[in-house]
């Protein structure tokens, strides 16, 4: 079997998937040299020692080190130092080998080529596969100030509280908008937040810069002001990433806006509701803040469609008369307790759990 196809098959065993496509093969050929892909097919999604990788690939440790370091520097495999020894592993497709090569910025012919290929692949099959499990990989988080005072709010719904569990914070360029090049919207790019082990990897490989917790909170505030939707990993335990998304460029929201995928993300626990007596009919919520067209105007009053509302809180946070508030849904989307539970549940729903486990035994 061709090494690029073998690598694609391995990557397809992850929760985000990598459906077969000539477009994705071209992406892999652009990212991985022939020597790199010959080694990458022996990696798993769990970090393995350099010696183990070299043994499986039948190459010297020096040759394996050179290839692994080259791929890690490009952001197409993961690396981790533990107890003085390096370990290497495959990355997910999303978030992973799509985003990381763009996170330090684009502007080259290679980035332009990759951007067009990834957009095509997203529309062909990747976006739909990513969104095909009833348990979504990502969830919407409301603007904190719009829900923080509610008695029913859960700790994992408050970003500042969740950040208290994190120890490393990284800021990178939004790969979705960078990859769009001249076709991207005018929303800010420097708003992608990554945490802990993956943050350390991206910082060390110069795809992101290290920031403080306070700076991360300021990024969220700036993103809210720009009308970007907070999305994060769909688990209760800890934050691994916060994407600040637009509906025109970003992978997560375009699964809904461009593909009408069945499970693009988990909606927030809340939806926006309007106090008609307080609404002044300014239309800011409908025209400027709602990214999913869930708000319309009827006789000069804002009206929300709860089914369309994703619970981001962007409208409530800027309503000049406080006419909009966040109301709990009748059916609250369940959030898996841990990232491991989330991944396992998604793999089961996609029928890939056994293949994933078998790969990681190698």
Image: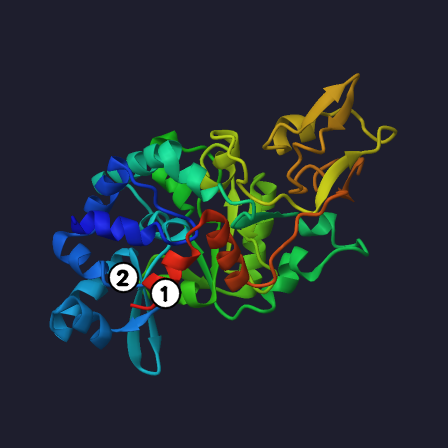
From the image, tell me which residue sits under label 2.
72
- Position of residue 301 in the picture relative to residue 184 (left or right): right
The residue nearer to you, when weighing 345 against 48, is 345
* Residue appearing at x 55%, y 64% in the figure: 213
* Residue appearing at x 15%, y 52% in the figure: 33
* Residue appearing at x 70%, y 42% in the figure: 317
- Position of residue 128 in the picture relative to residue 238 (left or right): left
Which quadrant of the view contains residue 315? top right
Kindly state the secondary structure of the residue where label 2 is placed. Answer: helix
Which quadrant of the view contains residue 166? bottom right
Q: Residue furthest bottom?
A: 83
* Residue appearing at x 33%, y 32% in the figure: 120
Kindly state the secondary structure of the residue where label 1 is placed. Answer: helix
Mark linked to residue 218: none
Q: Can residue 31 be seen in this view?
A: no
Compared to 47, does 230 lie above or below? above
Mark linked to residue 201: 1
Compared to 120, does 13 lie above or below? below
2 or 1: tag closer to the N-terminus: 2
Counting labels gives 2
Compared to 195, does 99 lie above or below? above
């Amino acid at each position: 079997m061709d090494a690029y196809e073998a690598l694609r098959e391995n990557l397809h065993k992850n929760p985000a998937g990598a459906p077969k496509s000539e477009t994705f093969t071209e992406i892999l050929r652009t990212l991985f040299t022939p020597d790199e892909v010959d080694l990458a097919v022996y990696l798993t999604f769990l970090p393995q020692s350099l010696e183990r990788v070299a043994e499986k690939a039948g190459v010297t440790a020096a040759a394996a080190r050179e290839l692994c370091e080259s791929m890690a520097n490009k952001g197409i495999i993961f690396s981790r130092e533990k107890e003085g020894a390096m370990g290497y592993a495959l990355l997910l497709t999303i978030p992973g080998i799509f985003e990381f090569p763009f996170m330090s910025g684009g502007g080259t012919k290679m980035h332009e080529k990759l951007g067009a290929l990834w957009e095509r692949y997203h529309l062909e099959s990747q976006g739909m596969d990513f969104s095909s499990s009833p348990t979504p990989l990502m969830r919407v988080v409301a603007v904190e100030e719009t829900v923080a005072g509610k008695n029913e709010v859960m700790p994992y719904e408050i970003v500042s509280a969740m950040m208290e569990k994190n120890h490393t914070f990284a800021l990178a360029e939004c790969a979705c908008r960078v990859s769009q090049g001249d076709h991207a919207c005018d929303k800010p790019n420097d708003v992608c937040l990554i945490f802990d082990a993956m943050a350390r990897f991206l910082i060390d490989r110069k795809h992101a810069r290290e920031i403080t917790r306070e700076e991360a909170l300021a990024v969220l505030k700036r993103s809210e002001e720009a009308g970007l939707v907070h999305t994060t990993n769909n688990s209760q335990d800890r934050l691994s990433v916060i994407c600040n998304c637009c509906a025109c460029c970003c992978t997560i929201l375009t699964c809904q806006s461009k593909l009408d995928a069945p499970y693009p993300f988990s909606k927030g626990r809340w939806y926006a509701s309007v106090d008609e007596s307080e609404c002044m009919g300014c239309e800011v919520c409908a025209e400027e803040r709602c990214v999913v067209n869930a708000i319309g105007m009827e006789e000069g009053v804002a009206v929300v469609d709860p089914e369309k509302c994703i619970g981001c809180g962007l409208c409530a946070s800027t309503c000049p008369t406080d006419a909009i508030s966040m109301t709990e849904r009748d059916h609250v989307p369940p959030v898996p307790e841990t990232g491991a539970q989330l991944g396992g549940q998604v793999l089961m729903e996609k029928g890939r759990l056994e293949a994933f486990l078998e790969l990681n035994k190698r």
